[in-house]
């Protein structure tokens, strides 16, 4: 499969974040932030130049387009993928990097075309929120799993079982490879384009985007056991009001919002008390 790469010149970090959010909505699947701008990637077959022009004209920016043969993709990622850490909690690296010392947990990720290396603010915030939660003997659902990084961290934190789903074949393939690289034993990877599992979990993770979260929020609510926790990200500050309103309708108690680089992540509790109030209403 061949890919289209677009290059946008801007050193405005806030604009880069806005562009990532907008480009995600028109099927772009991978991003690389540089000092001079932003690179974005998607399969040739999904490229919609008219939709792209609507976004670039909105922000009064220009772009350059190039084609990338699929066989060059891994080389491209490897040349730009550097190790990262979330304080002393978790370190993320590729297999060709040296081990990361002085962290509680180390995760080996080969990113390929998938989201979730820990470098982006949304993944970083999700991992940081997970740091202060009890995952021991818990069941976990990771909706929109990307590289599988959050599912892998959940197992390392003691989860009994993790169901990780994504709709993209690249993500499924990449997640399976990353699960194997981290010798995980309790993670199940499945392909799905919605959050309707027919199961319930102690903890639900969804690092994806506002529209997909809102489209699936009823399913997500059914996925969570009473008194279970929900972590959401892939969201901009202006998304918070709509997410909070939708969460309230599901009986979720908002516990925390954190912010990093103009992105937000939210933590909720599916409160038994709130659920009773929703039923009565």
Image (cartoon, rainbow, N blue to C red):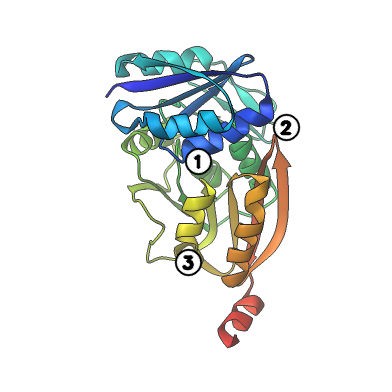
**Image quadrant occupied by the N terminus:** top left
SS of the residue under disc 3: helix
Q: Is residue 28 visible?
A: no
Q: Position of residue 15 (x, y in %)?
A: 64, 29
Q: Earlier in the sequence, mark 3 or mark 2?
A: 2
Q: Quadrant of residue 166?
A: top left
The alpha-carbon separation of the residues under discs 1 and 3 comes to 26 Å
Relative depth, front residue between 268 and 58: 58
User: Mark 1 — residue?
Assistant: 152
In screen coordinates, is 224 left or right of 258? left
Q: Position of residue 156 (x, y in %)?
A: 55, 42
In this rendering, position of residue 220 left or right of residue 278: left
How far is the residue under mark 1 from the one under mark 2? 18 Å
Q: Circle 3 sits on which residue?
A: 218
- Whether residue 102 is visible, yes or no, is yes
Residue 216 horizontal/vertical position (percent) = 45, 59
Viewer-nearest residue: 3 or 226: 3
Q: Which residue is mark 2?
A: 87
Q: Specify few, some or many for label 3: CA neighbours under 10 Å numbering under 14, 14-19, or 20 or more.
A: some
């Amino acid at each position: 499969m061949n890919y289209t790469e677009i290059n946008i010149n801007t050193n405005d970090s806030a604009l880069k974040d806005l562009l990532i959010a907008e480009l995600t909505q028109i099927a772009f699947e991978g991003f690389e932030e540089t000092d001079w701008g932003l690179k974005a990637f998607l399969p040739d077959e999904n490229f919609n130049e008219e939709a792209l022009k609507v976004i670039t004209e909105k922000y009064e920016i220009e772009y350059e387009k190039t084609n990338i043969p699929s066989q060059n993709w891994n080389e491209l990622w490897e040349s730009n993928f550097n190790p990262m850490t979330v304080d002393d909690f978790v370190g993320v690296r590729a297999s060709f990097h040296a081990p990361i010392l002085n962290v509680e947990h180390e995760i080996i990720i080969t990113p390929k075309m998938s989201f979730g290396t820990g470098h982006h603010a949304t993944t970083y915030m999700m991992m940081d929120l997970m740091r202060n939660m009890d995952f021991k003997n818990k069941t976990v659902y990771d909706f929109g799993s990307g590289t599988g990084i959050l599912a892998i961290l959940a197992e390392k934190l003691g989860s009994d079982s993790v169901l990780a789903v994504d709709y993209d074949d690249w993500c499924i393939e990449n997640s399976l490879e990353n699960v194997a690289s981290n010798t995980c034993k309790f993670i199940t990877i499945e392909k799905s384009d919605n959050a309707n599992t027919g199961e319930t979990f102690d903890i639900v993770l969804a690092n994806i985007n506002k529209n997909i979260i809102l489209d699936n929020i009823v399913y997500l609510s059914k996925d969570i056991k009473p008194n279970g926790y929900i972590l959401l990200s892939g969201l901009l500050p202006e998304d918070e009001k709509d997410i909070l309103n939708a969460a309230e309708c599901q009986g979720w108690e908002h516990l925390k919002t954190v912010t990093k680089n103009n992105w937000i992540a939210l933590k909720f509790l599916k409160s038994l008390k709130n659920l009773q109030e929703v039923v009565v209403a």
